[in-house]
Amino acid sequence: MKCPICKKPVELGEPHMPFCSERCRLIDLGIWADEGYRIPSTQIAPDGSSDAADDE
């Protein structure tokens, strides 16, 4: 398997799996904290705007 951040090979059972290192694990955590991973939605937000309008 490959590290999702740097694409280096990762052996089964590595301590930071699925990442190759603590550095890549922390980079991924930062992406999550900054809401970098999002699932597109067409639901209407509580303020009345739709998420789809944000993409324009």
Image (cartoon, rainbow, N blue to C red):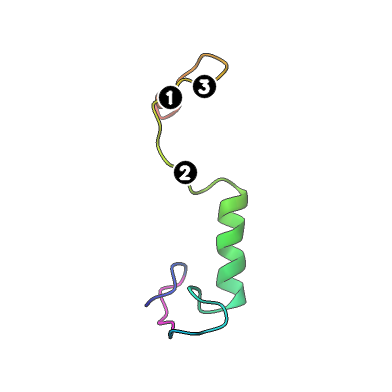
Which secondary structure dominates the residues rendered in magenta?
A: loop
Mark 2 element type: loop
In depth, the one of 44 and 3 nearer the eye is 44
Q: Quadrant of the C terminus?
A: top left
The residue furthest front is 13
The CA distance from mark 2 to mark 1 is: 14 Å
In depth, the one of 3 and 13 nearer the eye is 13
The span shown in magenta is 6-10
* Residue 13 shown in magenta: no
Disc 3: which residue = 45
Residue 43, compared with residue 10, is above or below; it is: above
Disc 1: which residue = 43
* Residue shown at the point (40%, 82%) measured from the top left: 9
Q: Position of residue 22 (x, y in %)?
A: 61, 75
Neighbours of disc 1 within 10 Å: few (<14), some (14-19), many (20+): few
**Residue 1 horizontal side relative to residue 30, left or right:** left
Count how many numbered circles sit on residues in the image: 3
* Residue shown at the point (60%, 48%) measured from the top left: 34
Q: Quadrant of the N terminus?
A: bottom left
Residue 48, compared with residue 38, is above or below; it is: above
**Residue 10 horizontal side relative to residue 29, left or right:** left
Disc 2: which residue = 38
For the residue marked with disc 3, what is the amino acid? Answer: Ala
Q: Position of residue 6 (x, y in %)?
A: 45, 72
Q: Position of residue 7 (x, y in %)?
A: 40, 74
Looking at the image, is mark 2 or mark 3 earlier in the sequence?
2
Mark 1 element type: loop
Mark 3 element type: loop
- Which marked residue is nearer to the observer: mark 2 or mark 1? 1
Whether pointer 2 and pointer 3 mark residues with C-beta atoms closer than 8 Å, the reply is no
In depth, the one of 44 and 49 nearer the eye is 44
For the residue marked with disc 1, what is the amino acid? Answer: Gln
